[in-house]
Amino acid sequence: DADPGNPKRYIMMIGQGGISLPDEEYYRLDQHAKIRESFLSHVQKMFELCGIDPAQAQLVVDLETQIASFHWDKVRTRDLVEMYCLQTWDEFVAQMPQFDQEAFLAGAKVPREVLAEVVNAQRTFPASLNSLLDESHLASWRAWCRWHIIDSLANFGPDSLVEQNHDFYGRTLNGIPQLKPRFKRATMMVQSAMGEAVGKIYV
């Protein structure tokens, strides 16, 4: 900020997350039972490809099922009035005493003093999630972290990871039979990450 003595203040948007399937209903409805089975198999295979004990996949699925049970469903998240829950930072932090919010801000390089308020879009989610933040769930959270690191980088890994990732998210979930050629995937990645910057150079 141009005036260090009077820094700009921002509103942070907070929303539910932590699951790998498209929506919370995939974890509970009978019509998605086969998807859940395929998801467990997918996580197992991805762990195997990365040299991780595939038995940890069950920990991931079980934890995500618990997290999904705290999610608001699609109908409730369409209510924009209900989702606009404005809180002070202290009010928000009080809902998750088990989570080190100060460490989170430090890791994200966000100075505490610039946070004016928080829009807690699904206001019941943080407090519910707090119930899972204890030592009894530590092994599950470690497996979950390993899984989400692998999942987020799968498209940039070796062909075995790329193919397995597409087999589940492409074929099983979205009915896309063929993986796009590598040059198209590379172009899409550049477009999503820095499309405006490339466009500016082109123009």
Image: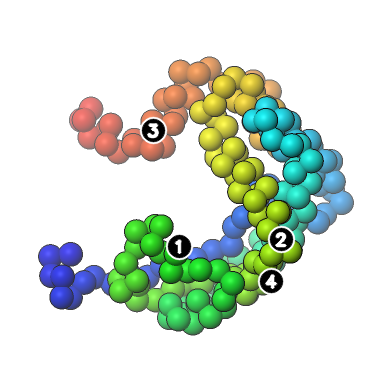
Q: x and y percent of residue 72 in the render?
A: 66, 66
> Which residue appears at 63% of the width and 71% of the height?
130
Q: Earlier in the sequence, mark 1 or mark 2?
A: 1
* First of labels 2, 4 by sequence position: 4
Task: Name the secondary structure under disc 1.
Answer: helix
**Which of the two discs, 1 and 3, sits closer to the camera?**
1
Residue at image mark 4: 131
Tell me the amino acid under the disc marked 1: Phe
Q: Do callouts 1 and 3 mark residues in contact (Cβ within 8 Å)? A: no
Characterize the local packing of mark 2: few (<14), some (14-19) or many (20 or more) Cα atoms within 10 angstroms. Answer: few
| Residue extending farthest right | 30
In the image, what residue occupies the spot 62% across and 44% down? Answer: 146
Tell me residue 188's x, y (percent).
44, 29
Q: Residue furthest front?
A: 135
Residue at image position (59%, 19%) is 159
Residue 55 in picture, x, y percent from top left: 79, 41
The earlier-in-sequence mark between 1 and 3 is 1
Which quadrant is home to the N terminus?
Answer: bottom left
Neighbour class for label 4 at 10 Å: few (<14), some, many (≥20)? few
Identify the amino acid type marked 2. Answer: His
- Residue that label 3 marks: 191
Measured Cα–Cα span from mark 1 to mark 2: 19 Å
The type of residue carrying mark 3 is Gln
Of residues 129 and 22, the one nearer the viewer is 129
